[in-house]
Image: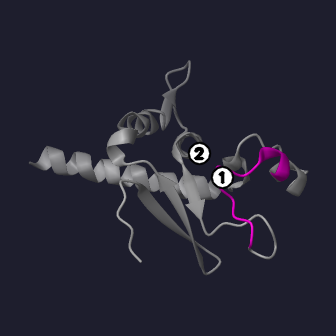
């Protein structure tokens, strides 16, 4: 059943299943998207430009993702990973990982892929605005 919300839902296909990541509405993330675009490249002391896109995308995801659907932390698929997941339970379930927040369990390449969609949307919007 379709649900109307102001949230942005980005679907990522993982092993023939869909994982949906939820973000606030675009207007609420305007400054975060601007920061993502700005932090993709940095100048080092010698005037060289370094590509920091991967790190900027991970930081954007960690700062803005407010939930996910279709991602479970148990083998039976009964316990979903959510922002409400107890950090202590997560540390018990995954003792080898250094879990500080629930997004620490999401692979970095997933974070980067989801965040890159916001980059693409911003670039398309800028291109459209310049063309008008």
Q: In which quarter of the image is the N terminus?
A: bottom left
Residue at 49% over, 22% down: 47
Q: In this view, does 95 lie to the left or right of 72?
A: right
Looking at the image, the residue that sits furthest to the bottom is: 16
Mark 2 nearby-residue class (10 Å; few <14, some 14–19, many ≥20): many
Among all residues in the image, which is located at the extreme left?
132
- For image coordinates 12% across by 49% down, the residue present is 131
Find out whether residue 20 is within the magenta segment: no
Residue 120 horizontal/vertical position (percent):
37, 54
The residue beneath circle 1 is: 108
Label 1: few (<14), some (14–19) or many (≥20) C-alpha neighbours in 10 Å = some
Which residue is drawn at the image coordinates 71% and 67% (left, top)? 72
Query: At which x and y percent is residue 40?
Result: 48, 38
- Helix, strand or loop at mark 1: helix
Dominant secondary structure, magenta = loop
Q: Residue at x 65, y 55 (%)?
A: 82
Scheme by which the image is coloured: one colour
From what the image shows, is residue 46 above or below residue 96?
A: above
Q: Where is residue 51 in the image (x, y as percent from the top left)?
A: 53, 39
Earlier along the polypeptide chain: callout 1 or callout 2? Answer: 2
Residue 33: which quarter of the image? top left
Answer above or below: position of 120 versus 62: below
| Residue interval drawn in magenta | 78-89
Magenta stretch holds residue 84:
yes
When asked about the image quadrant of residue 109, the answer is bottom right
> Answer yes or no: do the residues labelled 1 and 2 have beta carbons within 8 Å?
yes
Q: Element type at marker 2?
A: helix
Percent x, y of residue 8: 41, 56
Find disc 2 in the rendering and name its residue. 58
């Amino acid at each position: 059943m379709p649900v109307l919300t102001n949230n942005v839902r980005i679907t990522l296909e993982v092993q023939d299943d869909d994982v949906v990541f939820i973000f606030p509405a675009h207007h609420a993330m305007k400054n975060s998207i601007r920061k993502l675009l700005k932090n993709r490249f940095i100048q080092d002391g010698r005037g060289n430009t370094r590509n920091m896109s991967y790190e900027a995308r991970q930081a954007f995801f960690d700062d803005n993702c407010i939930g996910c659907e279709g991602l479970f932390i148990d083998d039976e698929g009964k316990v979903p990973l959510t922002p409400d997941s107890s950090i202590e339970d997560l540390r018990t379930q995954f003792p080898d990982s250094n879990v500080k927040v629930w997004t620490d369990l999401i692979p970095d390449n997933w974070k980067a892929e989801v965040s890159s969609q916001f980059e693409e949307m911003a670039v398309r919007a800028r291109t459209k605005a310049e063309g008008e």
